[in-house]
Each structure stands twice: as C-alpha cells, then as structure tokens.
Image: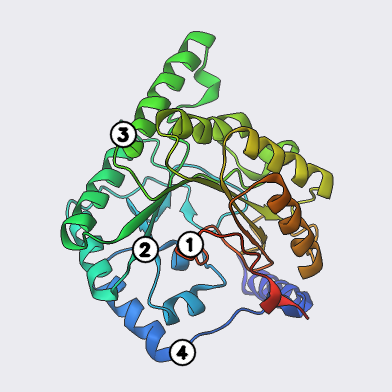
Amino acid sequence: MSRLQKNGQLNEMKAQIRSMPKWLRPSLGKASDISTVQKIIKQRQLHTICEEGRCPNRGECYAQKTATFLLMGPTCTRSCAFCQVDKGHAPMPLDPEEPQKVAEAVELLGLQYVVLTSVARDDLSDGGAGWFVATMTAIRERNPMAKIEVLTADFWGGRDELGTEKLSVSQARRQRGRIEVVVNAEPACYNHNIETVSRLQRSVRRGARYERSLDVLRIVKELNPSIPTKSGLMLGHGETETEVVEAMTDLRAAGCDRITLGQYMRPSLAHLPVQKYWTPEEFEQLGAIAKQMGFSHVRSGPLVRSSYHAGDSMEFKIQNSKFKS
C-alpha cells in the first residue's frame, strides 16, 4: 500500500472518529491505575480482550483494577467482520503456564469476580473447553473466594461445508460434550454472545450460526439450570428495533437470564461500517423492554460490552445514564 493510500485511510478513520456522537467518548481512567494493570498483564505475557478487542471501557475498568482475560492466545480461528481480534493466520501454541499466570494476576489485582474469555480455537480437539477448566481450577486454588464468569465460543469446531446431516449430528454431540466440560466446573455465569440479529448473522459472524449460539445457552440450562446464562448484542449493523426485540425474545426462550446491549464501533476500515448510532434514549427503551421480558440483569447503553461491570449486583440495572448527552 502506498503512503498516499495509507494517509487516505488514516484521514478517513479520523473523520469517522470526529463524526461519532459525543456520548461515545469513553472514560480514560487514571494513568497510574491503567499502568498497574497493564504491567501485571504484560509481565506475564497474558492477553486481555480489553486490549486485543480495543474495548472503549478499558480505561475505566483498569482504573477499577479489573480486566477480562483472553485465553489461548490473541489469534482467532474465526473471521467475524466486526471484531478487532487478530485472525487470518495460524494461532499460537498454548502456553502451558497460562492458567497459573492468570491465577497469579487475579491474586495481584485482588479480583473477587473474574471474567475469562477466549479466541475461537477450532484447531483444538476440545475447542479449548479443558483450558477454561484448567484456568478456573488454577484461579480457585490461589483465590478460593473468587467468582468466575466464562464467555466462550460456540465450541462447534467444524466447517459447515464439510457437512452431511450425519456429520452435523456428530458435531452437535461434540459441542454438547465440550459445553458440559465447562458447565461441570460450575462458573458463576456462562456467557455466549449472539452478537447481532438473525438476519445479519452471516455477514457479521462468519463461521457462526444464530441457532447454534442459542443452542449453547439452551444446553447450559439443560445441564445445570442453576447457572445463570448471559448473552449480548452489538447494535449498529443495520438491525431494526423489531429485530432486536425478536432476538431478545429468542434469548429468553433459550433460557437466557442476563443481557448486554451496546453500540458497535468500527475498529478499522477493514471492518464493517457502522450503519447507525443508537441513542442513549433508544438503549434505555430497549433495556426497559428487556426488563419486562424477565431478564434478571440488564446492561443497555452505547459503551456497554459483554463484561462491563460483570460482577455487579445481579439486580436489574440499566447502565446508560452516564452516556446521556
């Protein structure tokens, strides 16, 4: 790419940032607190979705000495069109010391509520389910009082184009077995995001399927109804309010207890453009609808993300007042 082209792209991204609504300006947090968290993470060569996904809330979360750990390396085997996480080449080998490193970081940060997520690892025989459990075990050994929320991929681990009906049934069985491995470790909450409405799944979530994701939440409830389940959507891909409400209805039908609704923000020109910036008032309205549907914990606001204030009270809250213009 020529310097002229690079400058053109940079100018386009700057123009997009300038045109963003003022309610999408995140809290930066105190530099000293941010440095403390980053030092603990980087010294152990760990990864967080906060950094790899360029979360707009990372300054605020770091100021509260919390982070969402990204397990199994920073490279994903999927190629979702909205996500900043690295993709397109072979993922890193697993670091055998990662579970212990995460446990040590949790202890140093004094976390009482820990969120573990991962890239999709379709290259692993169990999709990484056992790695979640190994990390949870390590955390509990050093931090027995810590509660652990997991945010997993769908654990499908196969390409649909290979598939006959027989293969699909076989993959579904493996998916259930992998989910069961994590459920048996009894996380405080099991999160799996559908990300967008049914109509937009193929363009936004390449390699994932809407019903398959709903199945993850259904399976968790079948295996252990006492574990709260959670999912989230990123708005701004061209969905309508009716479609969002339909997606929330589908989540409740799958037994989903908690929900997060946030605004999609384009990470780069290589990612899907934003079709709409939903207003704080629209998020407030959707949050109220979610409460009426029976979700036990609701986060609905422009800067809300999957793990935003994950360890807060399980009562109903709509966290968007701070974003109002």
Q: Dots 3 and 1: beta carbons under 8 Å?
A: no
Tell me how far mark 3 sits from mark 1, CA to CA. Answer: 22 Å
| Residue ID for mark 2 | 113
Q: Residue at x 42, y 47 (%)?
A: 89
Q: Amino acid at mark 1?
A: Ala
Of the two numbered discs 1 and 4 in the rendering, the one whose residue sits closer to the viewer: 1
State whether residue 142 is above or below residue 180. Answer: below
Placement of 36 over or under 93, stated as above or below: below
Q: Which residue is mark 4?
A: 30
- Give the residue drawn at x 34%, y 53%: 71
Residue wearing tag 3: 181
Q: Amino acid at mark 4?
A: Lys
The residue that label 1 is drawn on is 310
Residue 36 placement: quadrant: bottom left
The CA distance from mark 2 to mark 4 is: 21 Å
Could you say where residue 281 lies in the image, as x and y percent from the top left?
Answer: 80, 67
Determine the image quadrant of residue 251.
top right
Q: Is 47 or 66 nearer to us in this picture? A: 66
Whether pointer 2 and pointer 1 mark residues with C-beta atoms closer than 8 Å, the reply is yes
Which of the two residues, 288 or 38, is positioned nearer the viewer here? 288
Can residue 155 be seen here? The reply is yes
Mark 3 residue type: Val
Q: Position of residue 103 (x, y in %)?
A: 22, 62
Q: Residue at x 68, y 66 (%)?
A: 301
Nearest-to-viewer mark from 4 and 3? 3
Q: Work out how far the residue at label 2 is from the one at label 3, CA to CA, in angstroms.
A: 21 Å
Local SS, label 3: helix
